[in-house]
Amino acid sequence: MGVEIRVEGLRKSFGRQVIWEDVTFTIPAGEISALLGPSGTGKSVFLKNLVGLLRPDRGHVFVGGGDVPRLRENDLYELRRKFGVLFQDGALFGSMNIYDNIAFPLREHTRKGEAEIRRIVLEKMEMVGLSGAEGKLPGEISGGMKKRAGLARALVLDPEVILADEPDSGLDPVRTAYLNQLFVDLNAEMGATFLIVTHDIGTARVLPDNLGLLFRRGLVMFGPREMILSSTHPAVNQFFNARRQGPIGMAEEKDLAEIESEGAAPASMPAPIPPQLMPSDGGPRPAMRRPGAWLREHHVEAPPGSFIDDEGRDWMTEWESLTSARQRPQ
Ligand SMILES: Nc1ncnc2c1ncn2[C@@H]1O[C@H](COP(=O)(O)OP(=O)(O)OP(=O)(O)O)[C@@H](O)[C@H]1O
């Protein structure tokens, strides 16, 4: 099962470059969250702070009772076993075949025998659709396969939290769609907490339960997908609708000055909110909210055309008949 991550008052700088001043939010247990933001806003730095690879100037990262920046080396080593991290390029060892790459954390962090290791590695390879690729070297497989191998390796210690840094970078749209489906299916199956950093607006709009935006040395907003995708906050609206009009410019330094002279651009109507990706077996994930639930609860009108899928079905009104109910969120 996944754990909650609570971040409080996080500040990080490198020399005179302040990355963020005061980031505070909670990543809910067992849900899929995605973090976005223009280049250089510190998304990768944030992931590294969560696992203690970088230390903040100040602030807290509470995971499972411990405060990551204050853990001693031994405790940090233990805590890292709760995390499965998928780095941008898969971070595979080039000279090791895929099997040995995926087995690596088990050989490094556990005392399991080779038979048990084999069982786990083959199981995770099957989960990510890599069965049969055991003997291949990373240089012999495609970018998408490398990502899936990196993901299988992130899964072998049965993590409670999965962090993925731009898992879709460099993938074609079809492979991205497969990878997103894999995240949804894994979350449904494992119940782990997922935090995915992505630049892909298509992914951000359909995959996660929660979305966050980093911009201007801070977290602009973090919350349920429907809250973010219906927001008229200028930066949030601009970013999640991939618009040029708004406070985010080509370079952050430049747009700050521009905004001061121009004033904030008015936000336009948010685009229709698409239905959220369902697990392959058709049943909703435990963490999934009923389409429109957040909007209704907060008396926010859905942007026209929301929750209609490619086949013209309205997920808000036809939810019951469209989900083959195992556990139906209210
Ligand atoms: N170890 C480091 N030492 C000094 N500066 C660093 C270090 N790591 C990151 N930075 C700086 O911190 C800033 C944020 O980097 P980060 O890689 O987290 O950005 P990002 O939001 O993930 O960007 P992108 O979307 O382009 O991947 C950058 O300006 C980067 O140069």
Image (spheres, rainbow, N blue to C red):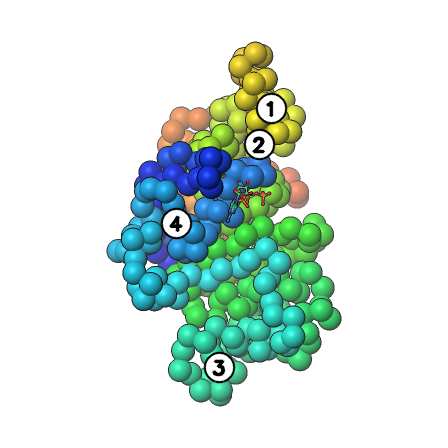
Mark linked to residue 55 = 4
Where the C terminus falls, by quadrant? top left
Q: Residues within 10 Å of mark 3 (few under 14, many from 20)?
A: many
C-alpha distance separating marks 4 and 1? 29 Å
Q: What element carries label 2?
A: helix
Q: How far apart are marks 1 and 2 (CA)?
A: 17 Å
Three-letter code, disc 2:
Phe
Tell me if residue 136 comes above or below residue 30 in the rendering: below
Screen quadrant of the N terminus: bottom left
Q: Nearer the viewer, residue 61 or 300?
A: 61
Q: Disc 2 and disc 4: Cα gap in Å?
A: 28 Å
Question: Is label 3 within 8 A of ligand 1 (CB to nearest ligand atom)?
Answer: no
Label 1 within 8 A of ligand 1 by Cβ: no
The earlier-in-sequence mark between 1 and 2 is 2
Distance of label 3 from label 4 (alpha carbons): 33 Å
Q: What element carries label 1?
A: helix
Confirm or deny contact between disc 1 and disc 2 (CB under 8 A): no
The residue that disc 2 covers is 239
Q: Mark 3 points at which residue?
A: 117
- Frontmost of labels 1 and 3 is 1
Q: Quadrant of ligand 1?
A: top right
Going from N to C along the chain, the mark reached first, 2 or 3, is: 3
Where 137 sits versus 297, above or below?
A: below
Q: Where is residue 281 in the image (x, y as percent from the top left)?
A: 54, 61
Q: What residue type is labelled 4?
A: Arg
Whichever of labels 2 and 4 marks the residue nearer the N terminus, that label is 4
Cα–Cα span, label 2 and label 3: 43 Å
Kindly identify the amino acid type of the residue bearing the numbered disc 3. Answer: Ile
Mark 3 secondary-structure assignment: helix
**Labels 2 and 4 touching (C-beta < 8 A):** no
